Image (tube, rainbow, N blue to C red):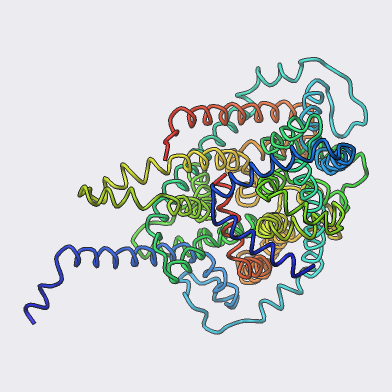
Amino acid sequence: MEAKKRLVSPDARRARIMRWLQTLGAVLVTLIMVFPLYWMLVTSLKTEAEVLTLTPTFWPESLQWSNYVFAWNSVDFLRFMFNTLYVTFWNLLIQTVVGVLAAYGFARGRFPCKNLLFLLVLSAMMIPSQVTFIPIYVMIANLGWVDTFAGLILPGTVSAYMIFMLRNNFMSVDQSYLDAGRVDGLGILGTIWYVLIPMCRASVITTSLVSFINGWNNYFWPKILSKSDETRLISVALVKMKNMWEGLAGSGFYNTVMAGVAISIIPVVLVFAFNQKYMLKGYSKNAMK
Amino acid sequence: MKGETAAMNTLRVRVVSDGSAAAAVSDSQRQEAQKSRKPRRRTKYKRENFFEFLCVVPAVFLIVLLNHYPLMELVRYSLTDWNMLKKTYKYVGLENWKWFFTTMDTNHILNSFKVTVIYTVAHLAVIILVGLMCALLLNRMTKSFAFMRSVIFMPHYIAMSSVAIIFIWLTNENYGVFNYILKLLGFGPVPWLSSSSMAIWTLVMVASWRGIGYNMLIYLSAMQGISRDYYEAAELDGASKVSVFRYITLPLLAPTTAFLLVTQFISSMKVYNIVDIMTSGGPSHSTEVLVYMLYQMTFEDYRIDRASVVAIVFFLFLMVVTALTMKWQDRKVNYDA
């Protein structure tokens, strides 16, 4: 017994204690970070009376799933989610088509002023839309596109970041693959579609997913550009819903509001959960360039 | 066709895994290929390059339309007396610029700048320090740690508007759980959003909750890139954990820190959503950040001309600070690893 005990050197024991402390710390941080989301779910399942107690309960007395039905019916959720999906879909489609073509052109083409044009694209990353929104709004107003889907889609039709990422990736593809595609009788577009994109699948998917999530979460442009329920997007609609309930019923309706927020988060969480590998890589990749 | 692409994919993987050596080979191959083909089919190349030029055109058009052209329009607007309610306007020279510099402090513009900078500095300090600490803490490659990492990262992809609504409820002064927990710990209720000295820190807290996970992720992936050799050498020399961190990890992470500083600086200077939803700039202008002010000037006062001046100054400020940071990065952070 004695001998066995001594085999564990003080160093090893200290390392083991450190490992336990690390695990403990990590679990603690995770719990703190997840708490707001936990509280959102718990609140969304409480009754109105339970929401308004001065000593909040950390688990609902009875699970009120009807809050979700109530939140879903209290505003036109389906329309707002459809609107958001519609705008995000078109943004993503245009952004990706325009982005892939431009990235191909910049990576493979040789034409005059190429570097100058590429510099123009890069410099756009330094111009935030929070600075330029006034002229863009005036432009959209002149087109008569305020409060239309076209207006909501226009500001998100191009992403300099996506062009930059894809161009870097396309440049690393060996020319002989593209030549092989051409020899086999594909056109240029066919080569891009059947050779280049499959070979750069990971970065095309990650940049598109990041674009999708940014589009779904966008608040600034929808707030400026949509004036009526017909074109309202989910992020703005949620805030409106919260203000409406607060005006009508004070803090008591936070269970409904939290249910609404939970509903709006679900699509993003699903997209993320199913593509976690791509997403995490996509987010961390830009730091490595 | 499908089989071929699959075959190419496997080939591609092999090329990539070889890293720099393969890249060097492919580069020289490409040059050789280009050299040998150039004289043979010159006309064909010309046509193809025209096609590639065409590929670039839509993107460049949209980018200029949505970025550079509006920037120039801002300069033009700033020289007019354009009120959005009116259809016509005339040029008034530097009138708006004079207005800007003479009434800066009475019009809350200076206050806005101050609030934005305070918010940005505090936000950056929290997300970068806590992000780094989380990265160190969660840097273990097991399944359970991977799960915890993705939980900590989760807030990053939840919309700021949803986050703001959740925290409005959490920080509710009567029924909110934050004040309840503080009461359990023996502290009085905190006026999270209703006190003008507290509101800005509440905003920093909320935004940081959302931002920490991203910074942790970036730091973690940078840490994975640090060669094991350094740590082994340090261990042989008998270095303590603290000095390993101080003299190896931290300096090697400097480029990452610089990257995070630049990108997060710009994105937190642009803060708008959270202010609009949680405080509407109040109480008494204490959280009125620049973009919120710009929005108010444009869509409440309809003074596009004056808003343009503020927007241009804001943009120039961003540019100058970014340029200075990059210069500092070039001088200080060049750590050949």
Where residue A181 sits, quadrant-wise, is bottom right
Side of B184 where A179 appears, left or right:
right
Q: Does B176 appear above or below B64?
A: below
Position of the C terminus of chain A, as image quadrant, is top right
Q: Does A17 appear above or below A281?
A: below
Q: Position of residue A9 (x, y in %)?
A: 14, 67
- Nearest the viewer among B229 and A177 is A177
- Residue appearing at x 64%, y 44% in the figure: B272
- Nearest the viewer among A243 and B318 is B318
In this rendering, the count of numbered labels is 0
Q: Does any portion of residue B175 appear in the rendered image?
A: no
- Nearest the viewer among B79 and B241 is B241
- Residue appearing at x 55%, y 59% in the figure: B167
Residue extending farthest to the left is A2
- Nearest the viewer among A206 and A195 is A195
Q: Position of residue B160 (x, y in %)?
A: 62, 55
Q: Does B109 appear above or below A218?
A: above
Q: Position of residue B328 (x, y in %)?
A: 48, 28
Q: Position of residue A251 (x, y in %)?
A: 60, 65
Q: Does A230 appear above or below B41?
A: below
Q: Does any portion of residue B329 appear in the rendered image?
A: yes
Residue extending farthest to the bottom is A62
Side of B119 where A85 appears, left or right:
right
Position of the N terminus of chain A, as image quadrant, is bottom left
Where residue B108 sits, quadrant-wise, is top right
